Amino acid sequence: MVEVDEFWETLALRLEEAVKRRVEKALPRGVLRDLQLTVSVEEDEGGGVSLTVEAELQAHPGVKKDVNAVVEEAVAEAFKEVEGELLKRGLRPVAERGV
């Protein structure tokens, strides 16, 4: 059986990969100059666990898409993608959006 910490680390990695894949797919080839992603896992005193995604994207200046919207959508869809892993363990995901 996978240890709890290993489970969260694996989930964070899958989340990061899913966000990257979705951002790259959403933007035309050659538009993305740099994408830095960080997924952190934090446990609170009550035993709750938070997954936080931080993204920094540099795109070609002539891009016509709203790159912030692309990143936000990619993060939301990536969370949906990994949600099944939480449900398999009987965990209830609670969505919370940062500003």
Image (cartoon, rainbow, N blue to C red):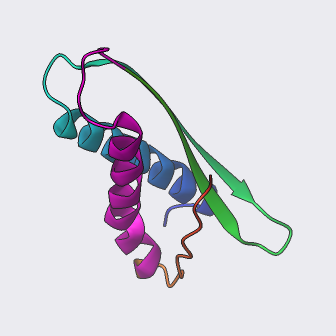
Say if 12 sits above or below 93 in the image.
Answer: above
Q: Is residue 63 magenta?
A: yes
Q: Nearer the viewer, residue 89 or 51?
A: 51
Q: Nearer the viewer, residue 89 or 70?
A: 70
Tell me where residue 95 sits by quadrant.
Answer: bottom right
Horizontal side, residue 33 vs residue 97: left or right: left
The percent position of residue 44, horizontal first and vertical second, equals 80, 64
Name the residue located 40 percent from the left edge and 70 percent from the top edge: 83
Query: Magenta stretch: dominant SS?
Result: helix
Horizontal side, residue 69 vs residue 42: left or right: left
Q: Is residue 1 magenta?
A: no
Residue most toward the right?
45
Query: What residue range appears in magenta?
Result: 59-87
Name the residue located 26 percent from the left edge and 44 percent from the top edge: 22
Tell me where residue 61 sits by quadrant.
Answer: top left
The percent position of residue 49, horizontal first and vertical second, equals 67, 65
Say if 19 sits above or below 31 in the image.
Answer: below
Please give the count of numbered marks on the rendered protein. Answer: 0
Tell me where residue 59 sits by quadrant.
Answer: top left
The percent position of residue 26, horizontal first and vertical second, equals 20, 40
Name the residue located 61 percent from the left edge and 63 percent from the top edge: 4
The percent position of residue 35, horizontal first and vertical second, equals 40, 24
Residue most toward the left?
29
Name the residue located 35 percent from the left edge and 53 percent from the top edge: 73
